[in-house]
Amino acid sequence: MRGVIAIVYIYSLIFLAILIFSIVKFFRVESTQNQIMYAVVFLASLLVIALRKLFAWQIIHRNNLKRDIRKLAEYMDHALRTARKS
């Protein structure tokens, strides 16, 4: 699991480099068409970074969520059993 998270963060660093490159090129080009292209590359890189961070967060917290859902199910089962006895 940690290997997957490390790979996700490495890819995020790669896309961060692409993002910075597109910002620099955006301000250096003269034509509007190239500015639009670099703006789209910037937004796409930003989106990829955000989605990869969400994916890594999901992997990190998956076991905690499963445990919390299991505890909630046990609590509800216990509450239903005590309600039936009453």
Image: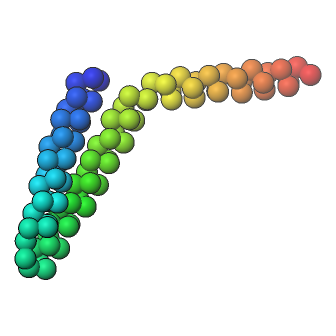
Query: Looking at this view, is 20 or 1 the one in front?
Result: 20
Residue furthest to the bottom: 32
Q: Is residue 58 left or right of residue 33?
A: right
Vertical placement of residue 13 versus 30, above or below: above
Among the 4 quarters of the image, the one containing residue 81: top right
Q: Please identify the quadrant where the C terminus is shown.
A: top right
Residue furthest to the front: 28
Q: Is residue 52 left or right of residue 15?
A: right
What's the residue at 51%, 29% (across, down)? 65
Coloration of the structure image: rainbow
What's the residue at 29%, 55% (across, down)? 47
Among the 4 quarters of the image, the one containing residue 25: bottom left
Vertical placement of residue 18 versus 71, above or below: below
Vertical placement of residue 65 versus 78, above or below: below
What's the residue at 21%, 60% (across, down)? 42
Measured as percent of width and height from the top left, residue 70 is found at 58, 24
Q: Please identify the quadrant where the N terminus is shown.
A: top left
Residue furthest to the right: 86
Measured as percent of width and height from the top left, residue 20 is found at 16, 53
Measured as percent of width and height from the top left, residue 84 is found at 85, 24
Vertical placement of residue 77 versus 27, above or below: above
Query: Looking at this view, is 59 or 12 the one in front?
Result: 12
